[in-house]
Image: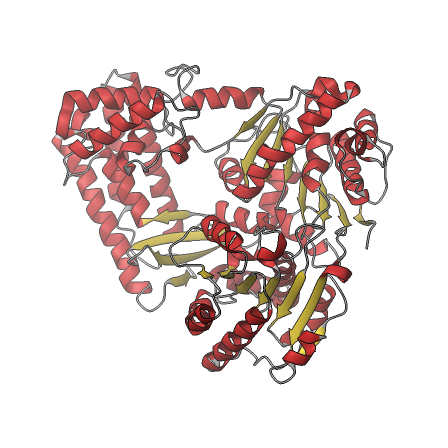
Amino acid sequence: MIGLIEQSGGSKPETGYLGRMVRSVFEEGGYLQDKLGLAHRPEQAQMAEAVARSLEGDHPLLFEAGTGVGKSLAYLIPGIIHSIDSERPFVVSSHTISLQEQIRNKDLKICRQLFEAVPELGRYAKFRTAMLLGKGNYCCTTRLGNALKEAKSAQTEMFPAEERADLTRIATWSATSKNGLLQELAPAPHPDVWDAINADSSTCSRKNCDSSVCFYQRARKQLLSANCVIVNHSLLFSLINAGMGPEGEAKGVLLADDFVVLDEAHRVPAIATDHFGLHISSFAVDRALKRIYNPRANRGVLRKVGEKWDQDAVDNALDAAAEFFSYLGDTFLTKKSVQRIHEGGFCENLVSGPLKEVAERLAAIIQKIDDERLQDELRDHRRRILGYRDGINGFVEYAEEDHVQWLERGGKKGQIVTLRTAPLDVAPYLREALFSRGTAAIMTSATLSDGRTLEAFQQKTGAEVADAKMVYSPFNYEKNCRVYIASDAPQPEPGQGRLDLDYLANMISWCVRDEPGGSLVLFTSYFDLRKVAERCEGFLKKINRPLFAQGAGQARTELTRRFADAGNGVLFGTDSFWTGVDVPGPALSQVILARLPFENPGHPVSEARSEHIRARGGNPFAEMTVPDALVKFRQGIGRLIRRHEDTGRIVILDSRVLTKTYGPRFLDALPIKDYQRFDRENRAEVFAR
């Protein structure tokens, strides 16, 4: 199916210069096809023109572009042209590292090649780009120099021998490093050493640092002069939540007078929910205090400038924090790792007073000393401590009634207790942060809708004012894809876990044996994944199929790479593997869905949002659970066909899609309408057809 589906804002105003330029690039026989030999894609042209109208009118846009549309070029080319013509920054945000790398290493190069090949577009060929990373990712050469001086003068008091060796190694590395990024250091530095030298400090400023030497200040200078700034969603919302965007009525989302595109935007509601809430862990509070003064190691900034009573204040705060978080863990988290908090005053706030005392001691020291660099460092520590105090006070008092609150236990040994909050409805926050800023904010993904309409996504993100459009994938799914649905899958009801898992292991093993290429098996819980992996492991070894299971200690990207290299591997994944996995060719020729991807209704956020919907007379399952599951379902099955030449099959091992009233919604979301039912008795016959 091809063609533009107008869901709202269907009128097409006449476009100006940008629209005409975009049309000349993307139309049949246009510059992309004529100069670079790229295939004409009608859907890509439709998207590019919609983006151009959005940019020219500074109007928000939601655009669902099916896999294979080529959406990156459809927003990058109009965005770069508009940035240079309007002298405004163009911010591109994505979720996955793989897409960021694709944009930097492939798509932006195509843009430059195009502009260089077309005389009419030649002036755009010198566009400048920059990557925006958090300050803590950069080495600050000023702080590094100060740390080296302290290590030499104070010896073991400030930096033990092992850390001094790390400082020396980093100093050698920084002399030749191009970007000064933490990710470039191997092995990773000691956390205390990196804390002492990274750019996440007021010490690292234009006043103290030379941009020709300091890695962060150099990156910041490049950022301010860039036409196209690349960022990830997590950092984008961290900075917005920290008040880093333009102030007051000034236009722009992140930078003054910018315009933004958020790719992989189906992940935005969840990421924004996380960042517009509170996240304070016992580990973070303990670490923040010990950076000021660690009584056991007799080190920290107060080792140099604090008196005995200043150090004692930090020691008291450490004890109070340990007691406070231990009480929460022992009282609320002994039987389960997540516990929702329903009202304020549920515990005594043991830590507020001691943290306030530390902040007051720091303020007094700042007044007494003359060293501006040290004053800046102490102010950073004081702001951090006061932030934790205010956050804990608000949590204990349940200060934000429009948020849900809960406690979590985490860490490898379950030793970390975390206070969490999240907005019940993230739409007002996104509406204010993105769609009320007087600028074009564009969200795009292959899956924003539930397969029919973008209305649910518009409401969830506060994007009611945005134009909403959809184009289908240009891929020939009818020819290249087959869909099989198990009709005998046991319903996932309480008490039948063993039966379900045995069934899944049997069906997965059979489907994998029957498919020579690689198989991606998607689960909705780690427990099911682990237990089914245990059942399948021996059989897969017997048929020489390598098994790659999430949670076995390997990073997601490394696991996916090894699976792709294997060619006939079996990858078991949950949650994050439903999206972002891009393995073209036979290495991924089968996607198996062990369950429909309904979210856990018992999680505090889902539970509270369900209550919120019920309170206004709505149906949480119909309004929230099913639409969310449909988006994730479409993401999961979208892992199969990534290129025009890809072929394969989708296997759904959940019979609810055939028996429940909501089943037709999932059937409508399939890329083809012709599917085959099968069970354990007839599967050989059905798959052989």
Identify which residue is drawn at 60% across, 36% down: 103
Quadrant containing the C terminus in the rendered view:
bottom right
In this view, the residue in front, 179 or 150, is: 179
Q: Is residue 147 left or right of residue 525?
A: left
Q: Is residue 230 above or below residue 568?
A: above
Quadrant containing the N terminus in the rendered view:
bottom right
Q: How many marks?
A: 0
In this view, the residue in front, 163 or 663, is: 163
Q: Is residue 274 left or right of residue 444?
A: left
Q: Is residue 16 above or below residue 293?
A: above
Name the residue at the bottom extreme: 681
Q: Is residue 189 left or right of residue 523?
A: left
> Whole-percent x and y of residue 212?
43, 14
In this view, the residue in front, 315 or 506, is: 506
Q: Is residue 200 above or below residue 400?
A: above
> Whole-percent x and y of residue 134?
45, 33
The quarter of the picture where residue 675 lies is: bottom right
Identify which residue is drawn at 60% across, 25% down: 256
> Whole-percent x and y of residue 655?
63, 77
The quarter of the picture where residue 649 lies is: bottom right
Q: Is residue 241 left or right of residue 534?
A: right
Identify which residue is drawn at 56% across, 81% down: 490
> Whole-percent x and y of residue 547?
46, 63
Task: Specify whether residue 546 is in view.
Answer: yes
Identify which residue is drawn at 25% across, 31% down: 166
The quarter of the picture where residue 259 lies is: top right
What colouring does the structure picture have?
A: secondary structure
Q: Is residue 643 above or below residue 48?
A: below
